[in-house]
Structure formats: structure tokens, C-alpha cells
Amino acid sequence: MKNGHLSSWAKNVAPSPTLAVDAKAKALKAAGEDVCGFGAGEPDFDTPSFIKEACGQALTDGKTKYAPAAGIPALRDALAKKYLEKGVLNEKNPSQVVLSPGGKYSCYMAILATCGHGDEVIIPAPYWVSYPEMVKLAGAKPRIVFAGDNQGFKVTPAQIEEVITPASRMIILNSPSNPTGSLYSRKEMEAIVELACSHDLLIMSDEIYEYLLYDNAEHFSPASFSAEAADRVITVSGFSKTFSMTGWRLGTLVANPEISKAVADLQSQTTSNATTFAQFGALAAMENWDLSMKAVQGMLLHFDRRRLKLLQGLNAIAGMSCQRSEGAFYLFPNISSYGLSSEEFSARLLEKEKVAVVSGHAFGAEGYIRLSYATSDEVIESGLTRIQRFCTNLD
Ligand SMILES: *Cc1c(COP(=O)(O)O)cnc(C)c1O
């Protein structure tokens, strides 16, 4: 073909580097290599069995047909109840809740429904790899604001204000954060919401790690701060991380009625409903909340132990410094003292020691690497030994 087969969208999109690292590690493993994988962005536990059983029952009962594009009514209702309790909704209005095939898709819909050509979207870095690509796919422009470990990986309102222009449309927040595990306090979050209000900006709040918290940390939904905040915040979450349901593909979005309807309409033309019987599994998770939270506490016990083990081990390596995470299941150590780019560091680490980590470059943070501690204690122990050896041999 003279003009090529691909659109400008397809030509310019970068493939997900986190999925790529994970695929490479899995391929090496399949080839018989002894790989320590810290690349995975998913819990290493199975979905709690009562959730799987509810899904199995739904299949048996013939819940195998299309559902409404925005989700089955009972699940939207259960989620509306949760968000009313969190203060994200000020009345129980299930029509403001939209289910999708994954939190990733909900993020994309939030951006696509509200941002377009000529708009700028402010993205704090280190960021989740997909945000800038999604913004570009919507025809809008990402504006990156960087916060390093010296400021706890959290941007200040002053930093955001500096990049606000008349074209600014939205700020993306992700707390707890992938890749850093940092968590905004209520006060820090309130200051950013105030700024968004005064400059008439939307906020997309990606709360996919809302229940994965350590050290008694507390998560705050910016939409719960005021009626004005609720009007301009789009709250995204999902079942993947909390309930170890990554393969189920179930995301959630809560927004004002106008945006929710637009998102439901966009979904009705691009994907239709999230898998019907999967939604019945999620419904069981919502309707048996005590059981669900017990399962989450069980996972957190393991995550927390591994977090502290990995944190201590990384900080014991000369030249490496790592901030304590407060949520999610990632650590994001600073490796800039070794004089290698993040890409080189992670490529050589995989080649020499068969340790898979993700380069900070992928998250807009040169000089860092991301390690997921959603992996076994044995992998963490062996991985630490190898990383230490690798770093020692560098100088
Ligand atoms: C994993 C993740 C998501 C969404 O995951 P899904 O599996 O699509 O629900 C969204 N945001 C962040 C920051 C994530 O890490």
C-alpha cells in the first residue's frame, strides 16, 4: 500500500513496557532460565474462591448473554452503595456508576469522554505507563510534572500551577501510586482539588489500589471532599488489584451524570458490556464485603512482609536508595548513582543476573527502577542477592 497500512494513532502508540518486561521474563523462564521476576503488575494470589464460585454459578445459571453496556443493575447498585459510604456519591445513584472491561479501559473512557484536540492533561510523574498514551489517543496533549524521591514522589500544587495554561483540561491522580507506592495525604489531596476548582479543571482519580495500604495508612477519594469536587472528579477503580482478579477484566468509573452517560454511550459503541458472568463474581465480592475484606487482609499480610524485606534489602545495597511505599505493591529505588541509564541498568540486570525489573524510563522517571513485590519470598531473597552482586560488580 502506497500510504502504509497504519493510522497515525497506531503508528504513534507505544506498547505497554510493563507487559513487555513480564512477557520477556516469562519467555526466559519457559526456556528453562532461572528468572527472578519483579516485573509483574498483578497480585500473585488466586481470586478468593467464593468469588470464583459465584461466577461458576452464574455460568451454570445461563448468565451468558449480553448485559447492559454500563453493567448489570445489581452490581451498579452495590457499587453505588460503596461510593455513597465513601462520600464519592452524595446520593445512591447507580446510573453514575459504569462497569467496563478493566480499570484500564475505564481510565481511557474517562479521558476520551472529556478530553480532545487542543486540550492538555497534567500527568504527575512517575506515572502509570498508560496515561500519556491514552491522552494522545484522545487527541489531547500530556503535560508532565515530575516529583522525585526527594519529595516523596508527590507533586505540589505549585508545580501543577506552573504548567496550567488556558488549554489545561484535566489532572490525573493515582494514589496509592503505580510505580512508587506513594500515597497523598488528605491535606495534600485537598490542595490539589482546590487548585482544580479554581482553574476549572477536571480530575481523573485512579484509585485501583485503594484497599492495598500499609502502616495504617488511609486512602482519600478527592470526589468526597465537596459537592464541587464530586462534580469535577472522575473516580476510576476496579476489581483487578484488590481481589486478585486481573484476568477477569472488570473496571469501575463514577462521575457526574453527564460524564457517566457519555462514558456508557462510548462503551456501548466500542465494547458493549464487561463479561456478564464475571460481573456476577464481582457482585459476590461486593455483597459479601466482610469476607472480601478478610481475603484482602490475608493478601496484605504477605505483601507487607515482602515489602519490608525488599525495602530493607535494597537499602542495604551500596549506592541504592529506596523510599518506603505506603500502598500498592511496588518499590521504586533510585539507581542513579551507578552511572547507567535506567534502561541499561534493567537490561543488563536481566542479561547478567536474570532479574526482571521495569526501567523507570517507562514511568517518566529516569534514574529509577520499579520492582513489584507481588512475588514469593524466595524470589525476593534470591533477587536481592543477585541485585547486590550486580551492583557490586558495576564499580
Ligand atoms: C493495574 C492498574 C490499572 C487497571 O488495571 P485493570 O486490570 O485494567 O483493571 C489502572 N491503573 C493502575 C495505576 C494500575 O496499576
Image (spheres, rainbow, N blue to C red):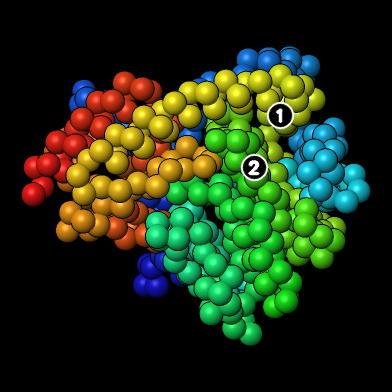
Residue positioned 60% across, 36% down in the render: 216
* x then y, percent, for residue 165: 59, 83
Q: Quadrant of residue 279?
A: top right
Residue hosting label 2: 218
* x then y, percent, for residue 239: 64, 35
Q: What element carries label 2?
A: loop
Position of residue 238 in the picture relative to residue 34 (left or right):
right
Q: In which quarter of the image is residue 362?
A: bottom left
Give the vertical position of 263 relative to 388 (above or below): below
Q: How many labels does the image show?
A: 2
Give the vertical position of 249 relative to 9 (above or below): above
Of residue 141 and residue 357, the one placed in the foreground of this image is 357
The three-letter amino acid code for the residue at tag 1 is: Ala
Q: In which quarter of the image is the N terminus?
A: bottom left
Give the vertical position of 49 relative to 136 (above or below): above
The three-letter amino acid code for the residue at tag 2 is: Glu
Residue positioned 52% across, 73% down in the render: 159
Residue hosting label 1: 282
Of residue 62 and residue 126, the one placed in the foreground of this image is 126
Of residue 315 and residue 169, the one placed in the foreground of this image is 315
Please tell me which of labels 1 and 2 falls first in the chain: 2
Position of residue 21 in the picture relative to residue 122 (left or right):
left
* Outermost residue toward the bottom in this view: 166
